[in-house]
Image (spheres, rainbow, N blue to C red):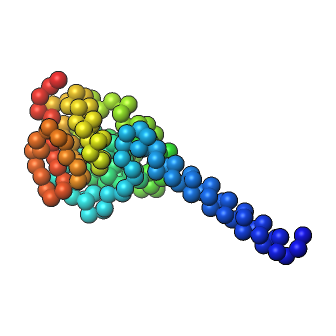
Amino acid sequence: MDYITVVLSVILAVLLIINVLGFWWVVQLLIPLVHFGGPYVPTQNAHVDEMIRIAKLVASDKVTDLGSGDGRIVIAAAEAGVADALGVEINGALVRLSQRSSNRLGLKNARFVKESFWKTNVSDRTVVFLYQVPYAMRKLETKLQEELPPGARIVSNDFRFENWKPSEEHGRIHVYVKTTPT
């Protein structure tokens, strides 16, 4: 093989690797959309702190973040001392990242599952965190009204429910309270 052939072979191999990695990355971004959720967009740390504060968490709370991404809200809730903090995420790579972060911090009260949040039973949850897109919020409004126990709080970053009046609003953070049994 001459020098030009070797260089072209290396360039083609690198381009193939970049294409494969790019394809994998796009697929990972599309997984939540195919399951009627939102894409992974991390919540800014300042908003995480604000959401945790607004949620008025107590030790006995059972917290869930539906579409937990890299786990930052679940980890913050666990660090705030809740007994049970659960992250539900469809992207397995993000679940593994979240669990590693939690393990590195030694948090025994935080756990993460790879699952569509549409299949997650939230009937024992007292606080649900959301950062979802409007079409997901429409369906989640019904799911949470049907499944959550009375008194459960929903803290949504940025997006609102169409038919459920928030009990509090702090800028772009909306708090809903389930008031009636179903």
- Specify the farthest residue to the right: 1
The x, y position of residue 170, in whole percent, is 13, 56
* Camera-side residue of 54 and 15: 15
Left-right relation of 39 to 157: right
- Specify the farthest residue to the top: 182
Left-right relation of 97 to 82: right
Q: Is residue 125 visible?
A: no
Q: Quadrant of the C terminus?
A: top left
The x, y position of residue 43, in whole percent, is 32, 57
Q: Quadrant of the N terminus?
A: bottom right
Left-right relation of 11 to 116: right
What residue is rendered at 57% in x and 53% in y?
A: 23
The x, y position of residue 172, in whole percent, is 18, 56
Rendered image quadrant of residue 76: bottom left
What residue is rendered at 42% in x and 44% in y?
A: 32
What residue is rendered at 24% in x and 52% in y?
A: 157
Q: Is residue 95 above or below residue 12?
A: above
